[in-house]
Image (tube, grey):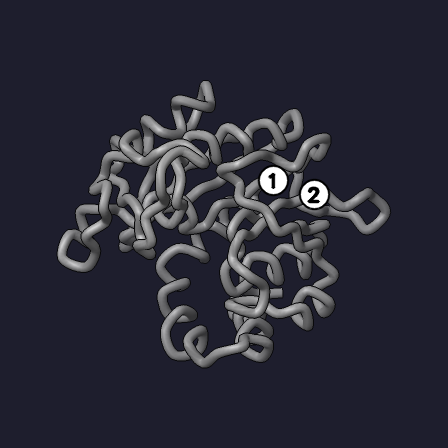
Amino acid sequence: MRLAEAQDVVEEYAPAAYYKDNYRGWESDYLPAMCKVIDELPTAPIADDLPPPRALDVGPGWGTMMVWLAARGWEVSVIEYVQIGTHMTYDLLDFVGAEWVPLDICEKPLFGRQFDLITMTQVLPHLKWNPLAAVRHCKEMLAAGGTYIASVLDAKYYADKFEPPYGTDWRAVPSFGRGVAKKDAVTVMYAEQDFRELLSAVFDEVTVYQPEASTVLFGVRE
């Protein structure tokens, strides 16, 4: 399944027109690059007679990556603290055959679970609690030889669009359950160095880059 076909499926099941009218267009800035990285992974599905590799999409939003991954042979689970029906529906989950887990990744991981691929697409800026715990929890769930991929908007392109309460200082965001979480849609933005320092605080080796003609930063640990 091509990315555009996955988006067609999401559009069909979306509970609101916002996906079609707005969000789908924004995805073109980062999802093609995300899909390219995944398709080149050694764990990407290559044979029908092998057990499917396991993917975890943290903060799946409207579900585009979930649909695309499942259609390409991955066994997909998603973690989300936003109530189902806000962006994604049970009907879409049933259509895809994915596992939905209501959980705040800042609080804890899925104990005893291991995944070959963990994705966090545009999730880190929206977390209400300190993102360091979220990335650490992802590392705990990453199988040996697995890949972690995160993407964030590059703050330098969005200075006039967002005024997050913590600016670009992710360290200032309180840890889970300590204090009162901000209600802002975007809690913190990321400059390239801040993003690199966050991921490097958890993973020994990480690659941070920006695809050509994109305003999105990618961080990959393979």
Q: At x 65% / y 37%, what residue is drawn?
A: 110
Tag 2's secondary structure? strand
| Residue 164 seen anywhere in this rendered image of the structure | yes
Q: Give me the residue at 38% from left, 50% from top.
A: 126
Count of numbered marks: 2
The reply to whether callout 1 and callout 2 are in contact (CB within 8 Å) is yes
From mark 1 to mark 2, how far is it between C-alphas?
Answer: 6 Å
The residue depicted at 40 percent of the width and 69 percent of the height is 23
In the depicted view, which residue is nearer to us: 53 or 126?
126
Q: Residues within 10 Å of mark 1 (few under 14, many from 20)?
A: many
Residue at image coords 44%, 42%: 150
Side (left or right) of 91 relative to 118: right
Q: Is residue 39 visible?
A: no
Residue 221 lies left or right of residue 207; in this view the side is right
Say what amino acid the circle numbered 1 marks: Leu
Query: Would you name the residue on which mark 2 appears?
Result: 54
Q: What mark, if any, has residue 117 been given in the picture? A: 1
Image quadrant where one finds the N terminus: bottom right
Q: Nearer the viewer, residue 218 or 187?
A: 187
